[in-house]
Amino acid sequence: MTTESQERQELRAAVNKFAAGYGPKYMEKCYQDGEYPWELWREAGKLGFLGVNIPEEFGGGGAGMYELSLVAEELNAQGSGLLLMVVSPAICGNIINRFGTPEQRQQWLPGLGDGSKILVFGITEPDAGSNSHRITTTAKRDGSDWLLTGRKVFISGVDVADAVLIVARTEDAKTGNLKPALFIVPRDTPGFEYQPIDMAVRLPERQFSLFFDDMRLPAEALVGDPDGGIMQLFAGLNPERIMAAAGGVGSARYALDRAVDYAKTRTVFKAPIGAHQAISHPLAQIKIETELAKLMMQKAAVLYDGGDDFGAAEAANMAKYAAAEASVRAIDQAVQTLGGNGLTVEYDLGTQLANARIMRIAPVSREMILNYVATTSLGLPKSY
Ligand SMILES: Cc1cc2nc3c(=O)[nH]c(=O)nc-3n(C[C@H](O)[C@H](O)[C@H](O)COP(=O)(O)OP(=O)(O)OC[C@H]3O[C@@H](n4cnc5c(N)ncnc54)[C@H](O)[C@@H]3O)c2cc1C
């Protein structure tokens, strides 16, 4: 049963087949060796999967977030999810495509599309956390240059990135609601310092703290208009949430498939364990929740691709919430279904328990989505 065009079904099948050649054992090895999954990344780039949303004039697929989230979903469904797809082609690709200068588009979009360049994204700050309106990274004009001062935390993939797209605020908009000013900061910029954070998750993509103090950037580092307002950021945050939902839907599918396969054959009493409703009902619930999350993700992508940023924001938040819940429950239930085997390295599920929890926290937490729906969708008063 599908509502997808032939073209989308073919893309889905191609990514699925490709991703099955990698999988959790490959990702785990990369994690243990401290290596970025370059082989998977580069091959996915060469096949055009990383750049399906990049315009054709820059060598991309000319499609949109629907297709990019489809790629991410299928990679995750094979245990081959690439976290940097969320930041590089999705957040940064969309922001630069929509608000970058012709030079910035030419410089970045072809590479983001074929994976030869990686741009990561830095918004989170230690003292602001979920409250982006409180960020203090400040850009000060110095002639035609900018001087950037601030600190960021939990920024993924800095060690393998060519540059970081930093969310700052200009000096004359230093307080109050965030009026973001976005800067492309190459990793080799003098004064740009970064340190890995020792994380308890098993991801081949590492997280970093960033520090910069009066770091000099040329005028061309600025993306868009410093007075452009929050919509420039939304051009990236909606894709971020759609991609996070895709990661959740894909990993829920991955866990569900493992659990169902096991439950069909493992027999310890008379019938396979999948015949016991204590096993089959939670799996059936997860199947329903995953399909519903996927539908909402596709709605968000259709709205975004159609140019409705505001409508997409509600759907993208809801999709991200639903997919995160489905994936956390799916991994937990899959481990339960496999019993002791669920916690062996051989079955590749126990190692994902901590990773699944990321979904409830990043890129936007479960609670902040509930706040958004309560206040924006339902019009309830705000406590914060
Ligand atoms: C693996 C990983 C990768 C990441 N990659 C990136 C990246 O590439 N770039 C980047 O910029 N950031 C990244 N992040 C950061 C991530 O977006 C933040 O961790 C997230 O937004 C939450 O912020 P915080 O950790 O400061 O939590 P806090 O904001 O301190 O929140 C702590 C808890 O309090 C709750 N809370 C806070 N305020 C409220 C409220 N008003 N109502 C109810 N509950 C509330 C939150 O929901 C949460 O449960 C990453 C994080 C992780 C874990």
Image (cartoon, grey):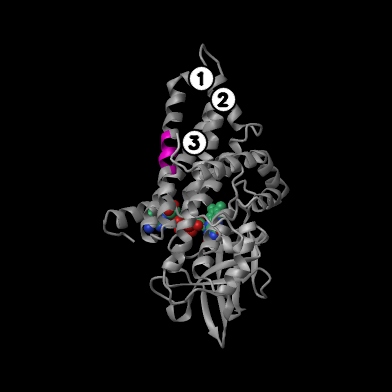
Q: Which residues are magenta?
A: 288-294
Q: Quadrant of residue 24?
A: top right
Assign a secondary structure to mark 2: helix
| 350 shown above or below 67 | above
| Residue at 70% from the left image edge and 47% from the top image edge | 30
Q: Point out the tag, 2 or 1, that comes first from the N-terminus.
A: 2
Q: Mark 3 sits on what residue?
A: 330
The alpha-carbon separation of the residues under discs 1 and 3 comes to 17 Å
| 148 shown above or below 289 | below
Assign a secondary structure to mark 1: helix
Number of numbered labels in the structure image: 3
Q: Is residue 10 visible?
A: yes
Q: Mark 1 sits on what residue?
A: 273
| Residue at 68% from the left image edge and 52% from the top image edge | 42
Give the main secondary structure, helix, strand or loop, of the magenta stretch: helix
The alpha-carbon separation of the residues under discs 3 and 2 comes to 14 Å
The alpha-carbon separation of the residues under discs 2 and 1 comes to 8 Å
| 254 shown above or below 234 | above
Task: Name the residue nearer the viewer: 143 or 361.
Answer: 143
Classify mark 2 as within 8 Å of ligand 1 or not, answering yes or no: no
Q: Mark 2 sits on what residue?
A: 262
